Image (spheres, rainbow, N blue to C red):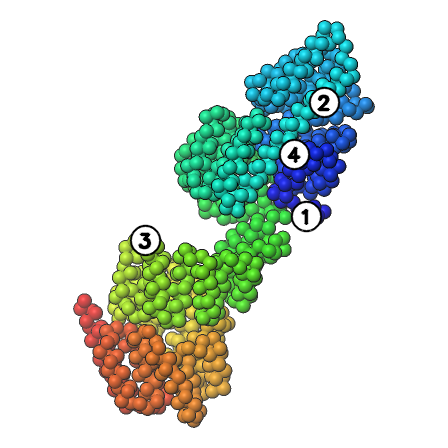
Amino acid sequence: MPDTAMPSRAEVYQTNILAWKFMRDGQYQTAIALLEPLSTLLDTQELPLRIETWYSLAEALSQSGQHLQALKYCAMIIDLTQNPDQQARLADMNLHTIALTYGLLAECAFHLPHIPLDHALQMTENGLRWLADRQREDISGSLYYVKGYLLLEQRRLPEAEVALTKALAIALRNQKTALADTCKTALLMLQQLSSGSSLDRASLKNFLSERAEHKDSYRSTITQFITQEATALNQTFEGQLAAAYLTAQKAIQLAARIESPAFMLRAYQLISIIAQKDKNYQRALDNFNTFLQQFPEDASALYQRARLYRYLKQYQLALNDINQAIELDSQKADYFAERAETLLLLQRYQEALNDIQQALTLMPNNTDYLMQRREIYLAMKEPAKALQAIDQAIVLRPDRAHYYYRRSNMYRDMERYQEALADVQSALRLDPANSSYWILRSYIYSSQKYLREALADSQQAISLKPGYGFNYFVQSSHYIALGQLTLALESIDRALELEPGEYNFYVCKAVILKELRRYQEALKVINAALEDDPTNTNRLQHRALIYMEAQCLPEALRDQEAIIQREPAEHSHRIIRALITYRMGRFKLALEDLAWSQPTPSGFALYLHRALLYRYIEEYPLALEAIQQAQTLAPQEYIAYQVSSLLKRDQQRYQEALEDIEKAIQLHPYLDYNFLHQAQIYHTLSRYSEAHQAIEQALQLNQHDAWIYYTRATIYWSQGQPERAQQDIEQAIELANQDERPFEQSQCLIIFTLFANRITEALAHFQQFLDDCQSAYFLQDTLFLLRGFASLGLAKRTINIFCQRLKQQIKALHTQSNKA
């Protein structure tokens, strides 16, 4: 094993198994060579693994005659168990090993001539007291046995008989047949000595040999059990569940031979793990029920069953079991932590907090419990205290990458992006192969508008975990932010290939198709997501927005009304209804939905849409007041400056409009509309070179928007280049014919055919638009467009006629709406 690598639990587990196999074959030095490097690398938090590894090493050293070295490792184990902070962390398996450690300690002392035999006997007494304090007489038989043969060596026959008889009674009571047989043999020897017969060296050698054989046989059975256990787990993780069940049954048979409840529990727990992987939760429960019928007061089994009940969301049954476990053993920190987890799920936050505090009292430096305390504080909406808990955990364990990752997420939620970035950088330094850390950094970069860097991080995550659909989903969201919708669609399609049942990916695809104006496809995708969960308000909201953008306004309003009925207190739903109703020309209803005040973030959307609505009814002072309030609430939102620029351009305040759109571009340099709007202002100011530069930027981001080509055509016309203008207008007409939004298609075709001096076609498109459109919003929007076109000096007479008819129809619709 590498000198600098921190071994995983699986590596420690497998190394111990291999070492015992070598010991069984008499290859003690090989076992020592395996275990010694491992013993120095073990994580200080992994107490159970340290005890098992040090004991394995002590056995190998003792068997090879290195008793002094073996004594050192035994003493290290005993020192650990004397620490009150550590005792609560000992597993049942460790208690058994510690009992053996006291015995091995005494044996090593027995073999060292400079240590008096009384000291060896004292070590057995210490071990017996330690087990008595924990009410674990059931595993003290082997220690009484060691004490008995040490007393035999001193010819203290009456005391030896008491110890050996006690060992035999414990062995018989706990059905430990092998130990019982060895005790009987030792008692026969004792009778031989008591009758005056001498115990020659050969007899003593045989006696000690029998004990060694018993211990070797016992450890051999444990090794076989661990091997079967590891095999069953590997089969489970590889999906070979039928084979795993068979292997686990062999482990149960071996556990019965070991004659230890701790090993029986491990065997039943193994069956439970396989059953849970098989989604056969009843079988998992049945296993624990069977074990608890034999050992009804086994606190560890009750704890395990409580965890399973919690997983199955049977919280009251989970509480019943964990309460009983705590009554049986109130010194186990894990039991309080488990109850805290269940109470957290039941939203009994103060009780959960009390339990996790008790767990931390028993184990003050356990960082897992500190992280659990963090979760409870987050649920209690006390982020400052949650942050203190994770800060403590990081101080204790600065080598745990996922702690930095979680704190980084917290900082990101608090919009403390620099601290979030610093923490995720720390996580990446510790574990650069974890794709989740790259994804988190990509989100942080995106929040700070570093969109290229965000995209690069999502691509790195994909290279590390190419079979994970979520990474492509994140990549797709970054492509959306960059305005690269075709690439975004490719990414989300790949995500769906990998995880076709993930309906959040369908929502993302629907959004992309909406932005591409492929509305029928978008509706098909979002409807598939709604079929999976018809009650999902978020998905219904997306369908309402698709209907709105597709100008299917009655359908959009129907969906939005259903959403408001489900969640009447959510103000953002009323903002979207206002968007729909003012597009329908029902301005009074829209204003009613926007007539309340709300702090950020809802307040930002409120004031933004108030500004847009006031623009359409040409109430510019109110519109500007609303957009200023939006900017105050969210000074980093580009769209507030975009709308402000639009309002000032309408009022011919071109320099101010230019300053606002430049600010919007700084905040979002990847949106084609910002550059298009900038080009239109430059054109109005006759700054043609800068207008062309802005148009080129827009085209780099989007080559499929008819208005970009139309705007460039108007610039060419103003520069006296009618041929180039004609080429662009033809391209604009072709793209407009592909638009799935009928009203916007009509708007485009009216303006573009007027520009191309195809007056007859323009009249036909205009009449069709008037016949179809019953929305004052779209009529007003067309009026804005025609006014802008009139500034070019083309088709003035026709435009005046169009504007008059639009005003008449808008007035009629307002009158009709007011009556309604």
> Which-is-in-front pick, marks 2 and 3?
2
Q: Element under label 2?
A: helix
> Which-is-in-front pick, marks 1 and 3?
1
Question: As displayed, is residue 473 above or below residue 135?
Answer: below
> Marks 2 and 3, Cα distance to the nearest angstrom?
73 Å
Is 573 displayed left or right of 111 in the figure? left
Which amino acid type is shown beneath numbered disc 1?
Ala
Q: Classify mark 3: residues with Cα within 10 Å, few (<14), some (14-19) or many (20+).
A: few
**Residue under label 2:** 209
**Residue under label 3:** 535
Q: Element under label 4?
A: helix
**Residue under label 4:** 51
Q: Earlier in the sequence, mark 1 or mark 3?
A: 1
Question: As displayed, is residue 95 above or below residue 273?
Answer: above
Q: Earlier in the sequence, mark 2 or mark 1?
A: 1
> Marks 2 and 4, Cα distance to the nearest angstrom?
26 Å
Confirm whether residue 419 shows in the render.
Answer: no
Is 67 displayed left or right of 639 in the figure? right
**Residue under label 1:** 5
Q: Earlier in the sequence, mark 2 or mark 4?
A: 4
Q: Which residue ends up furthest to the left in the rendered image?
A: 819
Q: Element under label 3?
A: loop
**Which of the pair 258/496 is nearer the observer?**
258
> Which-is-in-front pick, marks 4 and 3?
4
> Marks 2 and 1, Cα distance to the nearest angstrom?
40 Å
Question: Would you identify the image quadrant in which residue 218 lies?
Answer: top right
Which amino acid type is shown beneath numbered disc 3?
Thr
**Which of the pair 100/791 is nearer the observer?**
100
Q: Classify mark 2: residues with Cα within 10 Å, few (<14), some (14-19) or many (20+).
A: few
> Marks 1 and 3, Cα distance to the nearest angstrom?
50 Å
Query: Picture coordinates of residue 249 (x, y %)?
Result: 51, 34
